[in-house]
Image (cartoon, grey):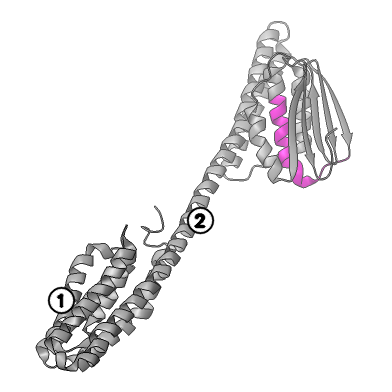
Amino acid sequence: MTSEHNPNGSKATLRRLNLYRLLPLVAASGVLHVALDARNWWHAVVLGAGVVAGLVAFVRWVDGRLMTVAVPCLVVASGVWLFGATVGDSSGSFIGLLIVGPLVVPDLRRHQLAAAAGLVVFVAAVGSTKLWIAPEEFRGDLIRFVLVPAAITAVVVGLRFPNRNFYDVVRDLEETREREAELAVMRERVRFAGDLHDIQGHTLHVVKLKVALAQKILRSDAAQAEQELREIHALVVDTIGQTKALAYGQRRLNLQAELENAKNLLEAAGAEVAVERDGEPDPGWSDPLSQVLRETTTNILRHAQAREVKIQLGTTGLVITNDGADGDRVPELRGLAGLRERVVDAGGTLVAEQHGDRFRTAVVFGDGSSR
């Protein structure tokens, strides 16, 4: 729902502010006009109808529903102006038309300038009927019933166009804010889906590996098979806990635990793992580094027949190198692609590249350069 149709939008709020500030002034001016120009009670009724038409149009404009009453309000206001020029001798009887016309014209879908010119000409033409009825006071009536009403109408209509543009700008800003809020929600959903993939995808691949290993050694080493099953159970329990923590926004990864877990998993898969540490990275980078380490470990288990894996952790980031990649086909690593944005948001860079049968994943923070 855009702000133009939203009853709580900024545009509607500004219009309501105009209502609270200007409606009493407009109503008071209308009452004063009727009190000064009406010669008898039925003159007061007719002139009052013009004021009411203007007030109704103003209130409906605030609600964003002006066009539902535009035609009847214009008809009533025009009739009152004609009455004032021909019968009532009231040069102020165009006040209703002065309110309704400038509100309606800028809200037209097309031909707004032509309508504005037509409104000014109409006000002048109706006022000129006074000159035909009472030609003896031609000069005074020309000023009171033609020139002044037409000039005031032209000025008010002219002021309404930039005012309309201002409301359009407010509406556009409101819509932009709403779109940004929607994008923020979508980004959060993508982030949540990525985190869920990190947890569930990693666990399922590890469980698959351990179940295969347990089946293989079930008859030859029952004790080890039982140990593998206990680890599978513990891994599933831990994943359930992480999923709950993710749902409540409490998930935090431990880099040291992820490093040990990755080493154990890769060695269980038959790879020789070398871990090199050159200082500790900033604690604030723990989460993105842990996520990349976990995702890379899962990718090695899925896509490579790695014999050697090298993990380098230092003050500027993390580098993971493995062999056994398919040199003829580069795998589509959607998980790392999703993590790249999170690493960038944390102030780092993520590079994933393949050279022959070797694949290298590097996360670098600060001013460090990938090794």
Name the residue located 31 percent from the left edge and 60 percent from the top edge. Answer: 111
Name the residue located 39 percent from the left edge and 68 percent from the top edge. Answer: 161
Q: 315 or 351: nearer the eye?
A: 351
- Residue identifier under label 1: 79
Above/below status of 43 relative to 109: below
Q: 252 or 296: nearer the eye?
A: 296
**Which amino acid does the dot numbered 2 rest on?**
Arg
- Residue identifier under label 2: 177
Query: Which of pointers 1 and 2 lies earlier in the amino acid sequence?
Result: 1
Residue 23 highlighted magenta (yes or no)? no
| Percent x, y of residue 185 | 52, 46
Q: Is residue 316 left or right of residue 155?
A: right
For marks 1 and 2, give the CA distance: 44 Å
Above/below status of 270 relative to 194: above
Mark 2 crowd level (few <14, some 14–19, many ≥20, 10 Å Cα): few
| Percent x, y of residue 250 | 63, 45
Above/below status of 297 relative to 363: above
Secondary structure at badge 2 equals helix
Secondary structure at badge 1 equals helix
Q: Main secondary structure of the magenta part?
A: helix
Q: Quadrant of residue 262?
A: top right
- For the question of whether residue 100 can be seen, the reply is no
Name the residue located 84 percent from the left edge and 31 percent from the top edge. Answer: 312
Q: Which residues are magenta?
A: 279-298
